[in-house]
């Protein structure tokens, strides 16, 4: 079975972008894959070291995974800091990756802002830890939002450089397999990672500005729908969402140049498991005064059971902690198997 890995940071409230870009895909992938889903708490301290109630934030992401339908018995749900092998492999990848690769990352530029010299070293090295998260399990498929595409390309570059730099040592110990990277045959220890980004809403945009990504750090709460919002709040936010004055077109091509309309139609399509064309076959020619109430109904129908279940789970912290602890044990056993081989390939004594 293909091995799927992905993670979500425990930084503030989860929103519809996190749900549609990541968590909903995690749920769908469970059926035919072996999945490892991680609350990436080590990542969460790169931008901000001190968090108010980090344990509560970690539990709330685990609760969101489970409330959305992830089965922590069949698959693995854990928090990253419980598996020190992630940080160990990240250190090795810090020595494989080049500073220039990190400097080019748009997320680093966005999050570091103008005062780049003052950003944490961890924020610069973030993609190296992300590569380690995935490759410590030698996972091949990674469901993420479109904003993570560049980090996954870097993960492929790190894997490829490791495979090439250590090729003789990998082969000599009987590890790895022969693969083609493009036209080039190589003997690879780490597989090339495939991003799973598609769907009608790969990047959910702000409700206030269709050119900006919906994000936890936007100061306006009206810009996003949080997974913990109640029905009235969801309704208010969608009713106030920015739109243009025109009616909806009858096919997706007609959304070009209308970012807010495209965003709302994409959200509707993703929430209803339809394509944008199917949504527009139903709503083409209609005004937003008709479409928005339908979107409110759909969003509330999909999200409110998840919100309710999240609240219920968060009342039983012992249960969530037990799930994370058990997931951590299972993840550690798998990660240690890789690390024993990696230490040997590099030549560390153990
Ligand atoms: N707007 C989005 N549309 C689609 N997918 C998104 N993701 C995040 N925002 C969107 C996806 O959610 C997963 C978890 O993201 P993360 O924990 O790495 O957090 P983030 O990307 O830092 O989240 P935010 O909300 O965007 O936070 P800030 O404001 O700090 O930048 C990932 O798969 C991500 O692609």
Image (cartoon, rainbow, N blue to C red):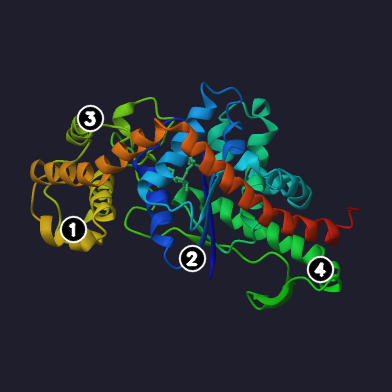
In the picture, the disc for residue 279 is 1
- The residue carrying mark 2 is 33
What residue is disc 4 on? 170
Q: Is residue 124 above or below residue 32?
A: above
Horizontal and vertical percent position of residue 185: 71, 78
Q: In this figure, which residue is indicated by the disc labeled 3? A: 233
**Residue 94, position in %: x, y?**
75, 46
First along the sequence among labels 1 and 2: 2
In the image, residue 63 above or below residue 179: above
Marked residue nearer the N-terminal end (1 or 3)? 3
Residue 345: image quadrant is bottom right
Cα distance between the residues tagged 1 and 4: 51 Å
Q: Where does ligand 1 appear, by image quarter?
A: top left
SS at circle 3? helix
Mark 1 → mark 3, Cα distance in angstroms: 24 Å
The nearer-to-camera label among 1 and 4 is 4
Q: What element carries label 2?
A: loop
Evaluate if marks 2 and 3 touch, with contact meaning CB atoms under 8 Å apart. Answer: no
The residue under the point 42% across, 52% down is 70
């Amino acid at each position: 079975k293909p091995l799927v890995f992905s993670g979500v940071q425990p930084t503030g409230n989860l929103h519809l972008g996190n749900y549609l870009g990541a968590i909903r895909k995690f749920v769908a992938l469970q059926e035919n894959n072996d999945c490892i889903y991680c609350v990436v708490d080590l990542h969460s301290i790169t931008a901000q070291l001190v968090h108010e109630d980090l344990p509560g934030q970690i539990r709330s992401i685990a609760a969101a995974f489970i409330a959305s339908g992830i089965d922590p018995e069949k698959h693995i749900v854990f928090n990253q800091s419980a598996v020190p092998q992630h940080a160990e492999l990240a250190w090795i990848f810090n020595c494989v990756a080049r500073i220039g690769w990190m400097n080019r990352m748009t997320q680093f530029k966005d999050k570091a802002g103008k005062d780049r010299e003052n950003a944490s070293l961890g924020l610069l090295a973030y993609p190296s830890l992300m590569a380690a998260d995935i490759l410590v399990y030698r996972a091949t498929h990674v469901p993420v939002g479109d904003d993570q595409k560049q980090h996954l390309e870097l993960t492929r570059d790190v894997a490829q450089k490791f495979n090439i730099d250590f090729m003789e040592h990998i082969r000599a110990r009987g590890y790895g397999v022969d693969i083609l990277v493009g036209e080039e045959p190589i003997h690879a220890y780490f597989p090339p990672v495939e991003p799973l980004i598609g769907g009608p809403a790969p990047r959910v945009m702000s409700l206030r500005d269709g050119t900006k990504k919906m994000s936890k750090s936007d100061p306006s709460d009206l810009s996003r729908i949080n997974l913990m919002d109640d029905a009235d709040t969801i309704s208010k936010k969608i009713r106030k969402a920015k739109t243009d004055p025109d009616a909806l077109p009858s096919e997706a091509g007609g959304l070009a140049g209308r970012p807010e309309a495209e965003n709302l139609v994409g959200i509707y399509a993703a929430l209803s498991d339809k394509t944008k064309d199917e949504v527009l076959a139903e709503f083409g020619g209609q005004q937003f005064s008709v479409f928005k109430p339908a979107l409110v109904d759909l969003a509330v129908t999909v999200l409110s059971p998840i919100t309710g279940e999240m609240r219920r789970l968060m009342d039983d912290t012992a249960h969530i902690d037990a799930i994370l602890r058990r997931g951590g044990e299972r993840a550690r056993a798998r990660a240690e198997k890789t690390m024993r081989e990696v230490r040997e390939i590099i030549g560390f004594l153990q």
